[in-house]
Image: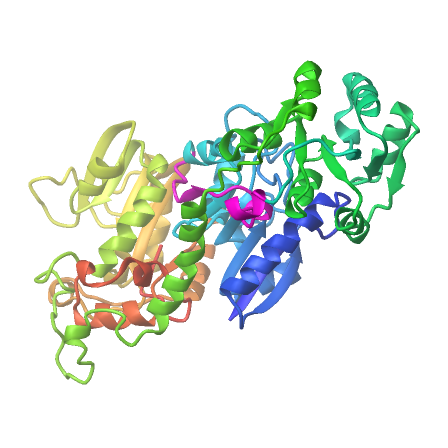
Amino acid sequence: MIINILDTSICDNNLGNQIIMESVNNYLRDIFPTAFFIKLPYIDTLGNEAIKYMKQSDYLFLGGTNALSSEMENYKQIGIDHNNYKHIEHIILMGVGWWQYQGNVSSYTEKILKHCLHSNIYHSVRDTYTKSKLNTLGIDNVLVTGCPTLWGLSPEHCKQIKKEKSDNLLLSFTNYSQDKRDLDLFKLLKNNYKDIYLWVQGPEDLEYARNIGREIHIIPPRLDALDELLSSNIDLDYIGTRLHAGIRAMQFKRRSIIIGIDNRAIEMGKDINFPIVLRDDLNSLQNKIYDEFETRLRIPSDEINKWKMQFQETNSALFNKKRFCSQNNKYSSIKPLSNVFGFDRGMPIDRYYIEKFLETNKFCIRGRVLEIGDNSYTQKYGSGVTESEVLNVTPLQNATIIGDLATGKNIPESAFDCIILTQTIQTIYDVKSALKNAMKALKPQGTLLITTAGISQISRYDMDRWGDYWRFTDKSLTMLLAEIAPEDAIHIDTYGNVAVAKAFLDGYALHELAPEVLEYRDKDYQVLLS
């Protein structure tokens, strides 16, 4: 198994990301003890070499930090943009947060996140604010777990953190969030602690701190130097504006107070119950320093375990010989359980992927919409539909257009905002002409939503009437569409794995497969393409 990690400590000058990535790496090694790990840069634009590794990986994780923002076109914390996002998919968030408090997510950012983030596996985010921002985009497979640096701070661990004030102080400041109140903060701390040790988490923190006060001991800007101080016998509290320096102190069972200066500490403080004081509330800080308080964090253990266990469940499902329907595990039969795609047993398996695709892209089903045969998907997934048209090659009661995509007969041009072609193109011999005519029928900025067969039985119903001609791969479909549309306007997904392929060919119904089996994607077994 190959695991790729977008490592937030690579090409980065914030040592807090080293603290984050240490936890990310440790937990992923626990989850995947025999995997081969490849680290990729996260903030440099991701190029061909990184994308090559991504495509070869079984899982791709983005580790920690505040990498998400509402306007990636103006401020991006990850090396994905309009030039490369089409080649990047199935990213799994692990303790990721939102950059700042921001307004609505831009359409540019929405397009990138919906394409690049894994649509099936649960994402782990730092706080409820980040979850709510993703939820507004329809990304609902999100769990609030807090940062992975917090996952080990159990009640048993926190009980070992002293309650009363220490004699000395570990301090941090944040250069990129300077404030005149920091001078008042330093004076208050200097009056209440014997010796103050400053850890430099960012390269300009030291200069900023020295401008505030010079009577401090400087800890070298290395994680091992910080750990050496925290593991020493020096009686020490932590107070500072650097969130992960404070979390590191708690990992070493040091009493900590985080000075909240941005959404990261404030939002995680709400969810996790950090000992947090806002920078503009120094009177409260004075009291907090002398209060005896117990560090009681609300670590969301259930959500953390749910996030971790999904990988064990998926791996178990993939390699368990009883993947589906163990009571019918007779693969040697020369006849399928059903020769009508499982319709006689329930919902066909491929419908799961078709409807998942349409649900993901339902925002495109608007305005004037054309569908083939009937308009059931338009009615189910459309919003803002002003006109619903039904195309059929022969007269039907509900057909509004009698025409032929292959010849272009009676197909209007520049007429539709969206055309839905589900499981249609494999039944058209001149598929290239059909796709060209479909493209001509779209308005500028219109959307063509296609699903088609990869690994599938013959449709006898279609074969005996107009034909069942083609089975596609992502490569063949890409090449076909590239002849009629610009490359950056095409996005192809594949669905299925060997277990799903076997079940689909044998005629099992959707309800007979476990969800984790359905969700796993193996590009060597492309049951359905969209």
Is residue 120 found inside the magenta-colored segment of the image?
Answer: no
Up/down of 325 relative to 441, above or below: below
Q: Position of residue 527 (x, y in %)?
A: 31, 65
Residue 500 location, quadrant? bottom left
Counting every numbered tag in the picture gives: 0
Up/down of 456 relative to 274, above or below: below
Say how the picture is coloured: rainbow
Residue 322 location, quadrant? bottom left
Q: Nearer the viewer, residue 427 or 440?
A: 427
Residue 191 appears in the figure: yes
Q: Position of residue 467 (x, y in %)?
A: 18, 65
- Left or right of 61 in this view: 120: left
Q: Identify the residue at the far right of this view.
A: 214
Q: Nearer the viewer, residue 203 or 510?
A: 203
- Left or right of 107 in this view: 203: right
Q: Position of residue 376 (x, y in %)?
A: 17, 41
| Residue at image location 61% in from the left, 53% down from the top | 23
Check the picture and name the quadrant holding the C terminus. bottom left
Is residue 152 found inside the magenta-colored segment of the image?
Answer: yes
| Residue at image location 62% in from the left, 64% down from the top | 38
Residue 42 appears in the figure: no
Up/down of 389 relative to 393, above or below: above
Which region shows up in magenta? 137-159
Q: Nearer the viewer, residue 295 or 270?
A: 295
Q: Position of residue 352 (x, y in %)?
A: 25, 54
| Residue at image location 64% in from the left, 32% down from the top | 74
Residue 198 location, quadrant? top right
Q: Nearer the viewer, residue 306 or 437?
A: 306
